[in-house]
Amino acid sequence: MSEAALPMRLALVGSPNCGKTALFNLLTGGRQKVANYAGVTVERKEGRFSTPSGRHYLLLDLPGAYSLDAASPDEIITRKVCLGEFPGESVPDLIVCVADATNLRLHLRFVLEVRKLGRPMVLALNMSDAARRRGIRIDVDKLQARLGIPVVETVAVRHGGAAELTRCLEREVPAAAVAEDSSDLHSQVRELIAEAVSMPRRTAEIDDAIDRIVLHPALGLVLLAAIMFLIFQAVFSWAEPLMEAIEIGVAHLGTWVGGALTSMPMLQSLVVDGIFAGIGSVLVFLPQILILFLFILALEESGYLPRAAFLLDRLMLGAGLTGRSFIPLLSSFACAIPGIMATRSIQDPRDRLTTILIAPLMTCSARLPVYALLIAAFIPQRTVAGIFNLQGVVLFSLYVAGIVSALAVAWVIKLLRKDKSEHALLMELPSYRVPHVRDIAIGLWERANIFLKRVGGIILSLTIILWFLSTFPAPPAGATEPAINYSFAGQLGHLLHLVFAPLGFNWQICIALVPGLAAREVAVSSLATVYALSGHEEGLQAIVASQWTLATALSLLAWYVFAPMCISTLATVRRETNSWRQVWIMAVYLFALAYVASLLTYQIARVLGS
Amino acid sequence: MRLSELDQGLSAVVQEVEDLTEKDPISRRLRDYGFVSGEPVRLVGRGPIGADPLLVQVGYTRFALRRNEAARIIVGEPA
Ligand SMILES: Nc1nc2c(ncn2[C@@H]2O[C@H](COP(=O)(O)OP(=O)(O)OP(=O)(O)O)[C@@H](O)[C@H]2O)c(=O)[nH]1
Ligand SMILES: [Mg+2]
């Protein structure tokens, strides 16, 4: 084989949730997102691998599709790649069709549809481990003979689970598939299954048993509420000791480094007031973010999320959404950007747009530091009703406030919309799976990495820039107020203060809002820097607790429930909707809601005497 | 009878899927899912609010269908 030859181009094609991405990761060593529901992959992804004999391949991971007659934006990508219509991309040399061995009645139909394209193709019967466990027997040779294409068994979640597939690739390049010219794919599937598959039971017994509880009209809802509540309790109570450790560590390091720099006061201020105060104040939130993700990752892999969507569909329909919006919206609790991307699996363009527009109202993890800071400063650490942590309860209510307003906004969008034709749900409920500890550990590690990169990248840069803007120009001789009042940032803060004073924001908050546009957490680090430069020595939480009124804190919390304070989200909306109009609608409505909510919160809180 | 009228826990056999509009995309998708003539289906459960959506088993898969989606599916007695 000549080394100069271009690598062969393979494409993973198959029904949703059959394990294409797991197979992609196994073969290429990639880290693409794998989760147990239909519609995880929404983009075309590329990777490379080589077989033991040294052949090189280029592998495409594609969104799952039920049919080439595409119904949603993600399916269109798959369709285009298969047909060679994807811009800048020729037809793949070989289609690796993947099917879930426990779900062949559904998946084989799509396999047959792909076979009709008449391209070279192999079939990977994935999840053969799960099939074996359920006593499903598949006569691979017979299937192979009947389909006229090579068929291999794979286990995408096990090391070496794709060995049969790579062996098959090394053996020969399969010829173009030929389909008998019979049009009814469903009856062909029935025949194939009758001949080659023995299925002791249509569904897994355990799935039926779990669903009886999880989808029970009353128990199911109670369980859903309990799970959601548990997450927020855990975020507050489990993270506590870890956060303290980080706080103490950063403080010690800051004092030590600051001590070494006493001969250079300017640099010392940059390092201690700028970098350590700023970065440290954000870094402490790592444990809380990881705990949140621990739950999200476990839920994603378990197969519970589509069940939650099932339970909530009617409620969401009333608000002008669909149960399908649930998963993108839940992802938005991590960050609105993947949440907005995930809306690609929503077929109805109206439902998709509404979901995109309200995604920023889900409290993303970057807002957590702001909430956590204010809650810790103003809400006493107390147990209510015997078991609940009061701070956890408040945090939970902030999340609820976001959700309720999202539903309200969706409802208004529904009222304003002229096209009132039917919206679709049509959603598959996957088998339950026990999350692998290793996969979750990897997922958390990646999250930690992303967070630390943000801290070391954009947050650090903004903090340093803010330090400069808050330090220069230096105060005139004989100045009486703290130096920062004379700096650029100080002047800007005082200017913005004119707009935000009715909301109860002081000028320090106004300064912090500006860099917060680039990354929400920076609002916290900026406050830390601004106060450090104003000559405050205590930790940020203590400063806030002593300097702000409760009304101001509540008002800022209300602001953060709504504020469109994230430029990357707006950029994603622009990309996903291909329209500046939607971006403007979103920014304006969020800003208006934020302003009104904060104004009301502050004024009411003041009247009530806080 | 329509699938949406089936009692919980009961099985039936699909006769056809109606198109409500010309080239009804929902009906087309239902056929892709395997709701085609002769296919056994079972109503496994119902959602908590207004008994909507329905949890329907067809082939080896469970789907969540709203009532008006399930109403497109005409079913008969199991053979
Ligand atoms: N037991 C078992 N589980 C598997 C196997 N392959 C994948 N899974 C699980 O199946 C689920 C779906 O895997 P993905 O790789 O995300 O599926 P996909 O085909 O890429 O899904 P979409 O991107 O939504 O089309 C995940 O929960 C995986 O952990 C396998 O061979 N055996
Ligand atoms: Mg995938």
Image (spheres, rainbow, N blue to C red):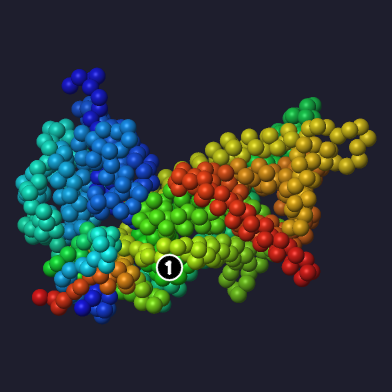
Above or below residue B69? Residue A594 is above
Q: Residue placed at 15% from the left, 50% from the top?
A: A112
Please name the residue that numbered disc 1 is placed on.
A317
Above or below residue B30? Residue A282 is above
Does residue A380 appear left or right of residue A41 in this picture?
A: right
Of the 4 image quadrants, the one containing the N terminus of chain A is top left
Q: Quadrant of residue A491?
A: top right
Residue A394 image offset from top left, x and y in percent? 62, 65
Q: Position of residue B35 (x, y in %)?
A: 20, 65
Q: Is residue A145 left or right of residue B32?
A: left
Camera sees residue A608: yes
- Residue at image position (41%, 65%) is A420
Q: Answer whether residue A283 is visible to the viewer in this image.
A: no
For image coordinates 20% across by 52% down, the residue present is A110
Say whether mark 1 is within 8 Å of ligand 1. no
The type of residue carrying mark 1 is Leu
Residue at disc 1, secondary structure: helix
Using the image, name the chain to which the residue with label 1 belongs: A
A13, A599: nearer the viewer? A599
Figure check: A172 above or below A12: above
Residue at the right extreme, as displayed: A478
In percent of width and height, residue A384 lies at: 62, 72
> Residue A550 location, x and y as percent?
74, 62
Determine whether, in the image, residue A400 is placed left or right of residue A203. right
Nearer-the-camera pick, A119 or A580: A580
Determine whether A193 is above or below A253 in the image. Answer: below
- Whether residue A392 sits left or right of residue A22 in the image: it is right
Q: Quadrant of the C terminus of chain A?
A: bottom right
